[in-house]
Structure formats: structure tokens, C-alpha cells
Image (spheres, helix red, strand yellow):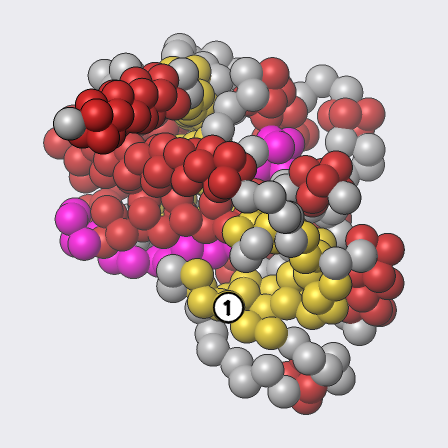
Amino acid sequence: MKNLFFLIFIFSIFLSSSAHVFGQRNYTIVIDAGHGGKDPGNLGNGYKEKDIALKVALIVGKNLAKIKDIKVIYTRKTNTFIDLWKRGDIANTAKADLFVSIHCDSHTSNAYGAGTFVLGLRGNKKNLEIAKRENAVILLEDNYKDKYKGFDPNSAESVIGLSLLQEENLDKSLEIASLIQANFTKKLKRLDRKVKQDNFQVLRETIMPSVLVELGFLTNKYEGRYLNSKKGQLQMGTAVADAVKSYVNHLKLNTVVNIVEEKDEVKTDIEFKVQISSSRNYLPTKAYNFKGLDNVTRVKIGNFYKYYYGVSNKYSKVLESLKLTKQKGYKSAFITAFKNGEKISVKEARKMQ
């Protein structure tokens, strides 16, 4: 009987502490309606990207605000012009957990379909043109040359040469992007233009997981009409909000697991690796596939394959590996850190050592 009372007592403590863990964590989501004010965005078929993006952004935020542990912040709620750097600054100041930027696409052809982007150094020519169009708003900002240190949104070299400030968040960015894209294509049956990586300045300015959503093409007669309709905006906004909810639920699970591990672990195993690339393509880890680099490892996360080089428990050694990969031409390579097989920030790993 004593043992029974003891077990009940322990179980009650566990429940109360678990409730405390879940209750004390709030998640801040920043919703960014692209363009605005003097910047209309694209005007395909006479529709205004800035208006559609704002209406969808407000629908996303309204859905998320219903969740008690989600705090929603908008970069704009009205038809106002916001500098790209300011949009990122709003998210950074709020210490947001996620940044979602909403846009509509355009093309000279009759292209259609929905796509989602995360930050990346390299992309094909088609993606590069999209990035250049969205980044062109920089030219409307006051003193843009000082703010962006000579960055030219019309220069392919400038776009490809951007430094990645949020590479440690790439995995999470890819996760939320995949959830959004799945909702667009599976629930709403929109043409899948895939999750892609490219150089959007608004994503570069943030220091948390971030995505840029292209809802569809206003230049396509039928898709433009759909995105300009209340039905289309409600469906697309709800699809984005549902994806964010799923993402936050995943964060909650990871938060609780991490807390339990920190209590139970006595010895900490830290490993550093250089991530060469992240791709949907499966490649044998042979040196000839990686410009002569030996001992490349591959890990599948969701629908993506991560390729790593230079595993070491010494940060100084992995720095040498990073230098070598960049010399080989992997300019977007970066250092990642793992604690007992779970990915953590490099900063946290170095503190632990």
C-alpha cells in the first residue's frame, strides 16, 4: 500500500511538472504580407499582389491567434510600405520562432502553381529571377546602398554571393516549407512547384526559421482570379495556418524531449559536422560525387537528404574541414552541431565544451 501511495505521489508530480513545461512556452509567429504602400508588387491581370498578400496574411494570423500558446505579430496590417530590413528586424526583436512571408508570383508565360522558398545560396536560373524580382523592392527604400552594403538586387553575382545568416535554421525552415507545400498540393490540389532554396533578402534579414510563400501566379488568368477571390484567399490562408500549427506542435514535442534528456544525461557527446548540401536527390557518398571529398555521410530527414563532411568533436578541426569544403567550391557549406545525435546550435555546443 505504501508503494502504491508513493507511485501516485510521483505520478502527480510528473503531471504537474509536465503541465508546467507545456504551459510556460509560448511561440511567436511573425506573418509578413509582402510589398505594400508605394510598392504594389506584381500587377498580373490587374490584380495587386500587395492587397492579396495582406488579405491572406490576416487570415493566417486570425487562425493562429485562436491557439492560446501562439502569439501572432504582423509586419504590416494595412497598406503601408515596410523596408525589407525592417520586416526582419520586427521578427528578430520579437525573438520569433518562425517568420512567414507571403507573396504572389508572376511570369511572362501562362505558368501557374504554388511554391515555397527557404534561404539558400544557389538556385537555377528560374529561381534566381524570382529572387531578383522580390528583392527589387530594395531600390524603393531610403539609403538602400548603406543598409545593404552595396547589394544590387538586379545582379546575379550579388544574389548568389549573399552570406547565409540563418543556416543553422535551415532544417526547420525546410520542415515548415514542406508542411505548407503539402497542404497546398494535397488538400487544395494546387500544382506543386516544390520547396526550393534561393536568395530572398527578406529571409536573409531574419535569424529564425523562415519561409517565403508564393501563393500562385497573378499573371495566370484562372489562378489570378482564384487568388483574388475570398474563397481562394481563405483556402490558401487556412492551408498556411494549418501547416504552422503542425509545425508548432512538433516544436512542443521537441521541447519536452529536450528537457527530459537534460535531466537524465550525465555525459554529453558533442559532434561537429560540415553540411555540404541539402537535397531531395539521393547520391552515393562516393568522392567523385563530392569533388574529391572522402568520408561524406548522408542522413535522410523527411523528404530531404543531408550530406555531411568532416565529423569531429573538436571545433577547431571542423573549421579546417569547412575551409576545405569551401575551397572545393561548396560556398554555402556551414558547420552544424549534434548532442547525442540530436541537432543543436553550434553556439550551444561550444558552450557545453
Q: Is residue 173 left or right of residue 109?
A: right
Residue 134 at x, y = what percent? 54, 39
Left or right placement of residue 58 versus residue 93 in this view:
left
Query: Which residues make up the magenta segment?
Result: 186-207
Residue closer to the observer: 185 or 255: 255
User: Farthest front residue?
Assistant: 1
Q: Residue at x 63, y 48 (%)?
A: 267
x and y percentages locating residue 223 in the rendered image:
23, 45
- Is there any visible trace of residue 236 in the rendered image? no
Image position, residue 133 (x, y; %): 55, 43
The answer to whether residue 147 is seen in the rendering is yes
Q: Quick one: SS at disc 1?
A: strand
Residue ID for mark 1: 299
Which quadrant of the figure contains the C terminus? top right
Q: Residue 109 sits in which quadrant?
A: bottom left
Look at 64% across and 53% down and name the residue there: 269
- Amino acid beneath label 1: Val
Would residue 192 be counted in the magenta stretch? yes
Please give the name of the residue rendered at 51% of the width and 23% of the height, measured from the top-left corner: 96
Determine which quarter of the picture holds residue 13: top left
The correct choice, above or below, for 54 with respect to 247 in the image is above
330 relative to 176, above or below = below
Residue 37: % across, % down: 48, 16
The local crowd at label 1, few if under 14, some if 14 to 19, many if 20 or more residues have their Cα within 10 Å, is: few
Identify the image quadrant of the N terminus: top left
Seen at 53% across and 51% down, the residue is 342
Q: In the depicted view, which residue is nearer to us: 116 or 320? A: 320
